[in-house]
Amino acid sequence: MTTAATWLPTARPFTLEECAVLAEAGIITEEEQAAVLAGKRRFTVDEYLALEVAGVLHEDDRVELIDGEILVMAPINVPHLRGTDYSTRHLVISLGNRAVVRVQGSILLNNRTMPQPDIAVIRERALDDMERDSASDVYWIIEFSDSSLEYDLGVKLARYAESGIPEVWVGNLRAREVIVHTEPSGSEYLAVRTCRAGQSISPQAFPDVALAVDDFMPPATVSEGEQS
């Protein structure tokens, strides 16, 4: 096994041509183009969504909005895919029609932050309800992390806590363990526990649902002695 290199998010760069499109669409002013090129301009959620309408961002782009910055997300490796696939399958079967299991879709946290967690278990809305799902709609979130572990346990987890997301599971692919966070307070979670192979986890919102770590966490991507 090889040690996963630590990944740190970087702002999505914009070209001069893209800045001109943003100005023409009214998303930024002409005077703000230099700030966008330099990566110093922060965006609101409405502006971020308008970038897709303007054709600058696309539905399959691996980006998310954190604190007004459009950040390039870490590439998804095979263990990440397997963890997401298997946990989604188990959750859909276990939860039935009691909740919606959203895979890599956005959740509105505030006017400048809209991440795309790997899995968000949210309350069901009517089919014709077009209001964007926010933190108050979330039962719990699951993130799978390898190279992005430090970021997911740092900045991203803090934003979830600040928004009152009641529970977050971070699947540490390096060690085949799930770090469960509950009781958000300010920018942190007061209760943290780690579940490993041979153990099961039940979310607070659905205590009758039990997921065995062995059933959705793939083999560790690094051995214990190699973890960074």
Image (spheres, rainbow, N blue to C red):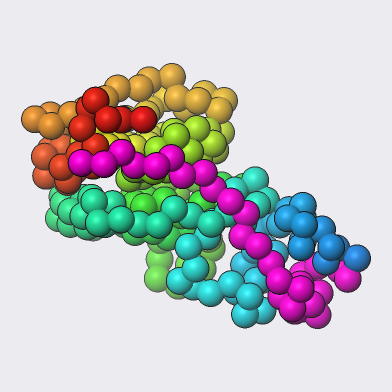
In the rendering, at what x and y percent does residue 81 appear?
26, 57
Q: Indicate whether 210 appears above or below 102.
A: above
Q: Is residue 24 magenta?
A: yes
* Residue occupying image coordinates x 69% and y 67%: 14
* Residue occupying image coordinates x 43% and y 40%: 6
Q: Quadrant of residue 209?
A: top left
The furthest residue to the top:
190
The furthest residue to the right:
31
Residues rendered magenta in the picture: 1-30
In the rendering, at what x and y percent does residue 193 appear?
30, 22
In the rendering, at what x and y percent does residue 3 appear?
31, 38
In the rendering, at what x and y percent does residue 56 appear?
63, 75
Q: Specify whether 60 is left or right of 11.
A: left
> How many numbered marks does the figure carry?
0
* Residue occupying image coordinates x 35% and y 57%: 76
For the C terminus, the image quarter is top left
* Residue occupying image coordinates x 26% and y 41%: 2
Nearer to us in this view, 147 or 210: 147
Kindly report the secondary structure that dominates the magenta region of the rendered protein: loop
Nearer to us in this view, 86 or 149: 149
Q: Quadrant of residue 169?
A: top left
Residue 31 seen in render: yes
For the N terminus, the image quarter is top left
Q: Is residue 214 magenta?
A: no
Nearer to us in this view, 208 or 44: 44
